[in-house]
């Protein structure tokens, strides 16, 4: 007797080896690892010239300056900057790879500039950018001179005068801010004419064939998939274009929101064409992207802020998840347990990625996943703007603010944007806490699979075997965990500095991270195309999902803030001082 499941075929209680090439979860793993292997082969053997020498000199300076002064001096920062300037993505091969897979460019008033820029327009843009850069560079030079003068005065007093030390630190901080603005302005001076249309067409065809390989082996029509894929891909490109508009970007409305909205616009007006449906494969795209996300979770980075960050991410998150789920069932009265757990995981763990993994583990309906993702995107856009402004307004320390945002804002990209709005310190802490939290994706998926199999769907008197749990467990999570372990080992063998150059800004930042964005974009478009508001209407009765999300996120905000303060400033203040 054969029973067809979403994630595996069960035949008389035994899985088939053929599932390895016939099932979506496994193809997500194979495709993800092919891309990670390509990234490793392209970037790891090609280190920037003089990388080892630059790193050695910089580290020697850092050690000397740390012994000389009680604060981070100008020379300390300059040595750090010399290491941060080493990026494999800046090499010729890195630029070539990025140009082939990059998304549409930013624009202000003419959307055509997102993919085509004439020589005249490029020259005009460059002239304006150079003027801004000259002003920013002058201010940075003046700030550097003041910082050096203040530091020299503090050094003349043997760094024993607290007032002089504080003045030096303040002036160095002001220089760092001015330098960051100058660096940002400099990036905009390298404007050159471009025409991305041929590359976007080539990228779309390549991705269609890439996913089509798995589609073929899964027993579906490659031709029908490819034709429908091109439709989905066009909407993904449009989502990137809309999100690249300057004012839209400032509002924090990312490509994910646009992708879902565009898909919903089609599905709820003219309806999604039947010939497109073979390519509306939400989980196929996003599972492959999640395998790539696993490579970004490097355990060496997790340890960089130690126990406080781990405690905030790994203790608060499960508490919020369980409490929210209980609240949804017992107080709010959510009728669907699968919707409840998907929203709870989405809100408490890390947004869309956790929602996808949890929905797969409990077999939530597609419209329930859409609802959870939609709530996440709306609140993420609000929180990434409101939280950094609130932190600044109340004068909250940036280490605390970074940990707070990292533990509560759902999307990794939104966390980074919110942290960067405050400072490098806030960005580092926020991104690291979110990175630690992302580890829980696999853990939560496994535990939900166990709970759903043994409790929610168990029949009276029926014994649940380990194999039954294995059938329910989303297999792509194995690829997610394996990618994290493999790249963590590579990172450890390279060392932190070389890892930054060859992985963070090489195999990961220069290839897999960009492609992960494309895959997520395709998935969000597919979510919109597969969703009809009439199918969602009954879930909104009484506003219960919204109430659940708001109450759960309120608990998350309060508990994360309190825990972060306790861990970073009461229990481990020495770790906080060293960040």
Image (cartoon, rainbow, N blue to C red):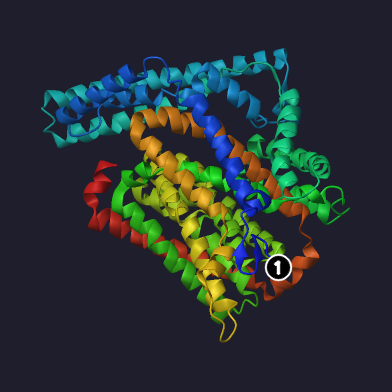
Residue 281 in picture, x, y percent from top left: 72, 51
Residue closest to the eye, 370 or 16: 16
Up-down: is 307 above or below 555? Answer: above
Instruction: Left or right? Give the position of 578 relative to 300.
Output: left
Residue sitting at x 74%, y 73%: 538
| Image quarter hosting the N terminus | bottom right
Instruction: Left or right? Give the position of 404 relative to 464.
Output: left
Q: Is residue 555 visible?
A: no
Quarter residue 425 falls in: top left
Residue 107 in picture, x, y percent from top left: 67, 30
Residue sitting at x 29%, y 33%: 170
Residue closest to the eye, 556 or 313: 313
Outermost residue on the bottom side: it is: 461
Residue 318 in picture, x, y percent from top left: 43, 65
Residue closest to the eye, 387 or 402: 402
Within 10 Å of disc 1 (Cα), the crowding (few <14, some 14-19, many 20+) is few
Q: How many marks?
A: 1
Instruction: Left or right? Give the position of 199 relative to 458.
Output: right
Q: Is residue 275 visible?
A: yes
Up-down: is 486 above or below 411? Answer: above
Q: Secondary structure at mark 1?
A: strand
Q: According to the image, label 1 marks what residue?
A: 2
| Image quarter hosting the C terminus | top left
Residue 350 in picture, x, y percent from top left: 51, 55
């Amino acid at each position: 007797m054969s029973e067809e499941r979403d994630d595996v075929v069960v035949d008389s209680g035994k899985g088939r080896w053929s599932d390895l090439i016939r099932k979506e979860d496994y193809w997500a793993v194979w495709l993800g690892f092919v891309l990670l292997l390509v990234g490793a082969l392209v970037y790891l053997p090609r280190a920037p010239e003089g990388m080892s020498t630059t790193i050695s000199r910089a580290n020697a300076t850092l050690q000397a300056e740390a012994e000389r002064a009680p604060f981070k001096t100008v020379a300390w920062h300059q040595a750090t900057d010399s290491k941060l300037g080493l990026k494999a993505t800046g090499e010729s091969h890195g630029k070539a790879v990025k140009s082939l897979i990059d998304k549409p460019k930013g624009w202000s008033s003419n959307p055509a500039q997102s993919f085509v820029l004439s020589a005249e327009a490029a020259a005009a843009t460059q002239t304006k950018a150079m003027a801004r850069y000259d002003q920013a560079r002058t201010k940075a030079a003046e700030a550097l001179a003041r910082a050096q003068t203040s530091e020299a005065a503090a050094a003349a007093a043997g760094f024993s005068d607290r007032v002089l030390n504080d003045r030096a630190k303040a002036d160095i901080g002001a220089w760092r801010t001015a330098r960051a603005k100058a660096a940002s302005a400099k990036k905009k001076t390298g404007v050159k004419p471009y025409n991305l249309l041929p590359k976007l067409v080539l990228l779309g065809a390549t991705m269609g064939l890439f996913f089509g390989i798995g589609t073929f082996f899964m027993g579906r029509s490659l031709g029908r998939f490819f034709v429908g894929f091109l439709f989905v891909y066009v909407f993904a490109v449009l989502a990137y274009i809309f999100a690249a508009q300057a004012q839209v970007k400032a509002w924090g409305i990312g490509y994910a929101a646009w992708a879902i909205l565009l898909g919903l616009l089609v599905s709820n007006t003219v309806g999604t064409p039947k010939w497109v449906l073979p390519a509306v494969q939400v989980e196929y795209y996003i599972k492959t992207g999640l395998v790539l996300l696993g490579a970004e979770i490097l355990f060496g980075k997790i340890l960089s802020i130690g126990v406080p960050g781990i405690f905030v991410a790994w203790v608060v998150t499960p508490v919020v998840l369980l409490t929210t789920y209980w609240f949804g069932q017992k107080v709010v009265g959510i009728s669907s347990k699968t919707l409840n757990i998907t929203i709870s995981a989405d809100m408490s763990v890390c947004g869309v990625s956790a929602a996808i993994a949890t929905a797969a583990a409990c077999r939530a309906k597609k419209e329930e996943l859409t609802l959870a993702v939609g709530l996440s995107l709306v609140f993420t856009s609000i929180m990434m703007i409101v939280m950094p402004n609130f932190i600044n307004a109340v004068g909250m320390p940036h280490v605390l603010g970074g940990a707070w945002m990292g533990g509560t804002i759902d999307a990794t990209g939104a966390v980074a944007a919110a942290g960067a709005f405050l400072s490098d310190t806030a960005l580092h802490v926020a991104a690291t806490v979110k990175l630690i939290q992302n580890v829980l994706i696999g853990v939560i998926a496994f535990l939900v699979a166990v709970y759903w199999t043994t409790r929610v769907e168990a029949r009276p008197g029926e014994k649940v075997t380990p194999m039954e749990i294995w059938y329910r467990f989303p297999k792509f999570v194995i690829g997610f965990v394996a990618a994290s372990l493999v790249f963590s080992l590579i990172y450890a063998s390279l060392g932190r500095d070389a890892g930054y150059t060859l992985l963070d800004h090489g195999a990961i930042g220069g290839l897999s991270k960009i492609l992960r964005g494309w895959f997520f974009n395709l998935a969000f478009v597919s979510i919109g195309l597969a969703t009809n508001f009439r199918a969602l209407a009954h879930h909104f009765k009484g506003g219960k999902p919204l109430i659940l999300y708001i109450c759960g996120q309120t608990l998350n905000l309060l508990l994360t803030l309190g825990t972060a303060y306790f861990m970073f400033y009461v229990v481990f203040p020495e770790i906080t001082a060293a960040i």
